[in-house]
Image (cartoon, rainbow, N blue to C red):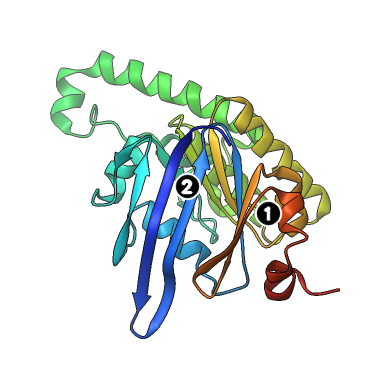
Amino acid sequence: MSAPLLEARGIKKAFGAIKALDGVDVTVGAGSIHGIIGPNGSGKTTLFNCITGLLKPDSGSVRLDGRDITSLRPHAIANSGIRRTFQAGKLVPGMTVMENVMVGINDRIGDSAVDLLRLPFRVSRREGQIRRRANDALDLVGMQDAAGRWAADLVWTERQLVQIARALIADPKVLLLDEPASGMGVREAEKVEAIIRGVRERGITVVVVSHDVKLLMNLSDRVTVLNFGEKIAEGEPSVIQSDPRVLEAYLGTQ
C-alpha cells in the first residue's frame, strides 16, 4: 500500500447503549481508491461523520497527512483538504447548478459590504476564478450543460453528480463519497465509476461508501468491511470477496 494519507485509529462512537463504532481502524493510502462496505447500521456513515467533524468520536483519532485533525471543527477539516458528499444529495434548491458548485469554495473576499465597496475588482476577479473551477468540476462529472439549471429541477442522479462537483471544486486531498451510486441503474453507476477513476487520475485520494459491492470491487485498491460497528476485514478486493466473515455478514454465503 502507498504511504498513508488518511488514518482513523481506534474510533469509538456510541449513541446511548448503541455502539455505532467500536475501535475502528482505517488507513487510506495516498492516491488510492479505498472502499468501505457493510450492512445497514454497520457504522459506515458514522465513520465519515467522525472523520469530517460532524460527529466527535468518543475516543480515537483522525490524522490527515500526519496531522491530528480530530478536534478541528468541520469547516477547518474541510479547509485542511477533506471534502465529502452525502447520501441525501444535499443541494440548495433555490440556486442554480453553477451556484451550488461555486459555494464549495469558502472565501472571505466579498463576504461583507465593505469588501464589495473597497475591493470590487479583486472580488470580481476571484469570482471569475471560482466560476472557471466550477466549470472544470462540472465538466469532469458530465454536468457542464446543466450549469444554468435550478437545482430543484434536477433528478436524483444529477443531484449526486453536482454534489461530487461541489466537493471537487476545492481540489481536496481526500474525497469522501457516501453512496454515490445509490438509486442508480447500471449505466448510471458505470458513469459514476468512470468519474471516480477520473478523480483519482487527478491525484485525489478517494474513499467510497457503497452498497454496490460490484462497483467497489471493480474500483477499489483496498476494501474495509464493517459489521455492527467493528472492522471485520480489510484488504484487496480479491481477498475480501473470499473472506468467510464477509460472506457471512454481508455478501451472503454460497
Q: Quadrant of residue 123?
A: top left
Which quadrant is the C terminus positioned in? bottom right
Where is residue 139 shown, x and y percent of the image? Answer: 63, 28
Give residue 84's mark. Answer: 2
Tag 2 and tag 1, C-beta contact below 8 Å = no
Where is residue 173 shown, x and y percent of the image? Answer: 45, 33
What's the residue at 29%, 64% (across, down)? 59
In the foreground, 247 or 160: 247
Left or right of residue 227: residue 194: right
Counting residues from the start of the chain, the first of labels 2 and 1 encountered is 2
Where is residue 26 shown, x and y percent of the image? Answer: 48, 52
What's the residue at 41%, 19% (across, down)? 128
Give residue 181's mark. Answer: 1
**Amino acid found under the numbered disc labelled 1:** Ala
Q: Quadrant of residue 47?
A: bottom left
Helix, strand or loop under label 2: strand
